[in-house]
Image (cartoon, rainbow, N blue to C red):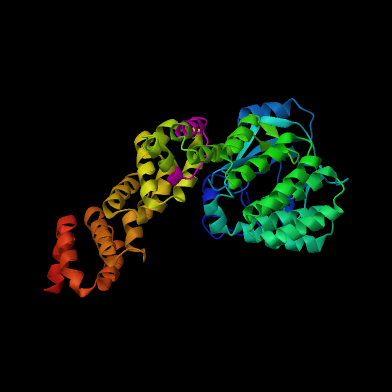
Amino acid sequence: MYDTGSTDDTVAIARAHGARVIEGFWTEHFGDARNRSLEHCRGRWALWIDADEIFAGDPRAVRASIAASDARAFFATIDNQEGHEGGAGASTIYYPRLFRRAPVRLYGRLHEQVVDRITGQAMIGPQLPELVIDHSGYTSLRRTVKGKTERNLRLAILAAEDVSGITAIGNLARAQIGSGHLEEAIETSRRGLTQAKENSHQVLFIKILADAFLALNRLAEANETIEELRRVASTAFTVDEHEVKLRFAEGDYERALEIVAGLPESGMNDLLYGVGRGRFAGLHIDALSRLDRHQEAAMQLRTSLREGRVPVPVSRMAQVLGAADGSLAEVAELLPREGLRGLLFGIAEAPPEAADELLEALWRRYPGEPTVLTVAARVGRLVPLIRAMEWSARLRQHGFAERCTLLALSDDSRRTPRERTLAAAIALEMFHDEAALPLLGEALSAVPDEQSAPVLAEMRILAPRVSDSIELADA
């Protein structure tokens, strides 16, 4: 593992699991960092996995394939979780992540390319179906916590200063639209189109323009741009993936449904991105709902869940299923285990009440599941006090006392002094956790005088020994 300066426990955790860790450095350049990491690799083949990714394929099948092949590289399927918003819950790209180490270097500050060390030509090879990577770096939560969109914009600006050329302009336009700088993305894409000679570059800039106009609700310009895309694209679904969003924005839900129905189950657009009906499951569900076809919307949601996809936010799932006399508990039963990770990212971004309801259903299905507990620890500080107490007991039972939801709640300034006081008192009463003592003192001092008696009365019920100690001290 090549670490570029993490500030958490990444290095210690990796070493504890037997990884050989190289404590490296970061120079605002992905290509350089990856090349430094390759210098420490020892095998004939290299597979690169980022910190926000997991390998989700078949390792035995991958090893068998490279042993029997003379290819220099293999393309991986990279499934991106993208915020769990309708129509953009996931996307797929294909990229040469597995390659023979000796002849390769990585080129580019951002969106780096795998190239031949001598010729600089892009490494190509067959797609390996068993080589699947699950990427969660562009969920709404990860974008916010890590500041990825602004970082990518900063790197794209630096890259454009490093080298001139159409690739740098394309990366800058992508970073601008990804970070919400829509007018700048339009200007950059128009500049790119004046220089683009290859069809793929033209398609890239027109697609960015279409997305920017849609985001700005400039629907007439989006229409014109999509027609321009239709003239240069080599596959119909390169156009369809934009037109379906446009028709939905215009309120033509029937036409949007027709376009979704015409998309292939799976395919590849002109930019080697995966395109298929499943990617637009969220939009499909929302279009049916807008047409008051609630039973069909719920059926489409259930189908997506059975296939392991999380097409809409958790709160939206509650609405769709509720309108068809269903409930969130269905989600836990329908979604196969391999879809759990994507669902948990959605739960972490959901309103606390819906998140807690779904976490409880998942706990009943997967008792003791650490990933469910991890998200419950995040959500637990925001739920009602009794629910925080239940999650605290579960976390402690399974060895996660340091993630106690009662302690987190008592230290959360968004909660009332009453809630914080009772949470700390319960943690001290039930679990004899001395970490609750300073939190209890701080929360008690914040309780208004007129609320002191009622809070103490509740404490006598929920934490009688702690209540007795406080009253004795006051006496």
**In the image, residue 155 lies at what x, y percent?**
71, 60
**Residue 162 appears in view:** yes
Q: Position of residue 450 (x, y in %)?
A: 18, 73
Horizontal and vertical percent position of residue 6: 58, 58
Number of dots carrying numbers: 0
**Apparent side of residue 269 relative to residue 401 in the rendered image (left or right):** right
Give, as a single range, the part of the protein colored magenta.
298-316
Magenta stretch encompasses residue 371: no
User: Does the magenta stretch mainly form a helix, a strand or a loop?
Assistant: helix
Location of the C terminus by quadrant is bottom left
Query: In the rendered view, does 257 fall on the left or right side of 210?
Result: left
Q: Nearer the viewer, residue 306 or 50?
A: 306
Task: Name the one closer to the observer, 142 or 89.
Answer: 89
Let me know if residue 465 appears in the view.
no
Say above or below: 257 vs 12: above
Residue at x 32% of width, y 48% of height: 391
299, above or below 7, in the image: above
For image coordinates 27% across by 61% down, the residue present is 419
